[in-house]
Image (spheres, rainbow, N blue to C red):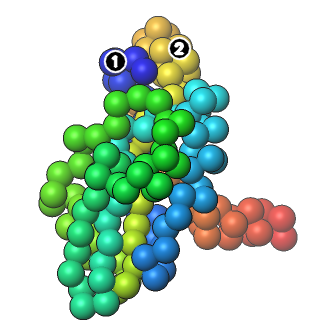
């Protein structure tokens, strides 16, 4: 993974699993994204919120052997980017008796484009992500 990330988008997501039932079913899709050079995982932490509201954060290396095995195919040095404050804020958004994967990734697919923009003397002046509902509403409006 390249050390120079200037201008390459970095994103984060908190993905909730009701009932604290994360079993690793999404890991193969994540591995595929990494292997195809689409993303680089920068940090991945699990957060759980019990029915009483108590919160636990678990780093990948702290998982039990069975859960850890699901992540063996992920290459790279993952961790250290998210602070305790980040994890606490993410956990606040969780429903009681649920768990979440807090994931930070670099959009590796964008590196060539960013290099081309910089090489052409360009600079990023704005960037935002549109939610699905906004895009769907805009497309529906354009079709009518």
Q: Is tag 2's residue or tag 1's residue first in the polypeptide sequence?
A: 1
Quick one: which residue is furthest to the right in this view? 144
Residue depicted at 49% across the width and 47% down the height: 69
Extreme residue in the front direction: 65
Residue ranking furthest to the bottom: 52
Mark 1 highlights which residue?
4
Viewer-nearest residue: 128 or 143: 128
Instruction: Give the x, y percent position of residue 29.
Output: 63, 47
State whether residue 107 appears in this view. Answer: no
The answer to which of 29 and 128 lies nearer the viewer is 29
CA gap, disc 2 and disc 1: 15 Å
Look at 49% across and 10% down and name the residue there: 120
Q: In which quarter of the image is the C terminus?
A: bottom right
Residue 59 point in image, percent of width and height = 29, 52
Residue 135: name its quadrant.
bottom right
Q: How many marks?
A: 2
As helix, strand or loop, the secondary structure at mark 1 comes to loop
Give coordinates of residue 33: x percent, y percent.
Answer: 60, 38
Numbered label attached to residue 93: none
Position in image of residue 46 (x %, y %): 35, 60
In screen coordinates, is 105 left or right of 84? right
Q: Which residue matches tag 2?
A: 116
């Amino acid at each position: 993974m390249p050390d120079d990330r200037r201008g390459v988008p970095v994103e984060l997501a908190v993905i909730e699993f009701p009932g604290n039932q994360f079993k690793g079913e999404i890991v193969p899709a994540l591995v595929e994204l990494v292997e195809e050079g689409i993303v680089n995982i920068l940090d991945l932490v699990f957060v759980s919120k019990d029915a009483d509201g108590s919160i636990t954060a678990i780093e990948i290396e702290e998982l039990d052997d069975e859960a850890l095995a699901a992540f063996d195919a992920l290459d790279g040095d993952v961790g250290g980017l998210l602070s305790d404050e980040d994890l606490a804020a993410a956990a606040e958004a969780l429903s009681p008796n649920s768990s979440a994967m807090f994931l930070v990734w670099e959009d590796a697919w964008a590196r060539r484009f960013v290099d081309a923009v910089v090489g052409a003397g360009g600079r990023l002046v704005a960037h935002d992500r549109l939610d699905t509902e906004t895009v769907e509403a805009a497309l529906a409006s354009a079709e009518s």
